[in-house]
Amino acid sequence: METPPLSESAQPSGPPWIITQPAPPRKPRIFLWIVMIFLAFGLFGSFGLNLLLLAVLGGGTLEEPRVQERFVSHNRFGTEKVAILSIEGTILTGDGFVKQQIDHARKDIADGNLKALVVRVNSPGGTINGSDFILHHLHQVAQETNIPIVVSMGGMAASGGYYVSMCVGDRPDTIFAEPTTWTGSIGVVIPHYNIADLIEKWGVEADPIASNPLKTMGSIARKMTEQEKHIFQKLVDDGFTQFKDAIRQGRPKFRADSAALDRLATGQVFTAQQALASGLVDKIGFVEDAVERAIRLAHLDAAKVKVVRYKAEPKLSDLLFGQAIGRTPVDLSAILDSAAPKAYYLYCW
């Protein structure tokens, strides 16, 4: 039986002695793709984890950031500089970013660039030590350089926030409060709590071993004795006297009228209008008004003035994850420090 001839399209190509076979079908590579995807995720996951650790441990350390200058207003290319130095939030040690701003300003003055300083205060105050530290170094700048310092109060400049505002010296019309500012709260407080009844109810007994009963004075585990109250009151009184002395230095009106200051130094917080009427502030105005006053006091040509604001240089953690991560490291010394009794120039409940 004869084999039917192949059609022309089915004729094998090439020499007649080579028989071609169809290529075998390719095996699926799904498994290979799965492995590659897992490797990619692992690589990027490892990179992200290392970046996070770098941000927390490196970019989010407790070290203070460096000071940057950001242009605010007037002439970007001006040769006469006015800087806005910010005191924000609760004042703790004072030796932090505020001090870095002061040092930066001092160097800029020495270089002949900075002609006037606006201190922007938005703070309820804080520790006596921290508030006095800041005021001391601002006073040094004013005395050593003689450049004008003008204060611009934000939403709150109370207690220690008012205390540091006394850096202006004797120059008139140098403390500006915004229309909604709260200020004043002149006084001292040592927070104390007595939870002895609660401890007894829980069946807990406080039994410290100390060299003297006064070593544990102010303990929250028992009621304060009259002797302890007297000692703490003396500490408060001394801090209160220091507060009023600082106000007399920054507010000439009260040097000749101590009774007027005593009437205001009750710890009460005042509105901007009340503070203006009583002489605690000079003007109601915004930071722009304080800047203009600083320009006039320094006898500058406004057309040649460059106004900058001191800002913290952003860390890697700030850029990647926001500013909150910069505060994630736990400082055990800060926890212990918070347990120690302190006197505060602080507006609080």
Image: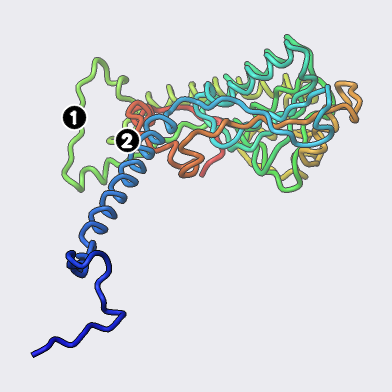
Of residues 61 and 34, the one drawn nearer to the viewer in this rendering: 34
Q: Is residue 254 left or right of residue 209?
A: right
The x, y position of residue 170, in whole percent, is 80, 20
The x, y position of residue 277, in whole percent, is 80, 40
The x, y position of residue 213, in whole percent, is 27, 21
SS at circle 1: loop
Q: How many marks?
A: 2
Residue type marked 2:
Ile
Q: Is residue 337 above or below residue 20?
A: above
The x, y position of residue 130, in whole percent, is 53, 24
Question: Seen from this angle, which residue lies furthest front?
Answer: 2
Of residues 61 and 52, the one drawn nearer to the viewer in this rendering: 52
Residue plotted at (76% across, 38% down): 287
Alpha-carbon distance for marks 2 and 1? 12 Å
Rendered image: mark on residue 220:
2
Residue plotted at (74% across, 14% down): 109
The residue that label 1 is drawn on is 207
Q: Is residue 246 left or right of residue 95?
A: right
Residue plotted at (31% across, 44% down): 43
Of residues 16 and 133, the one drawn nearer to the viewer in this rendering: 16
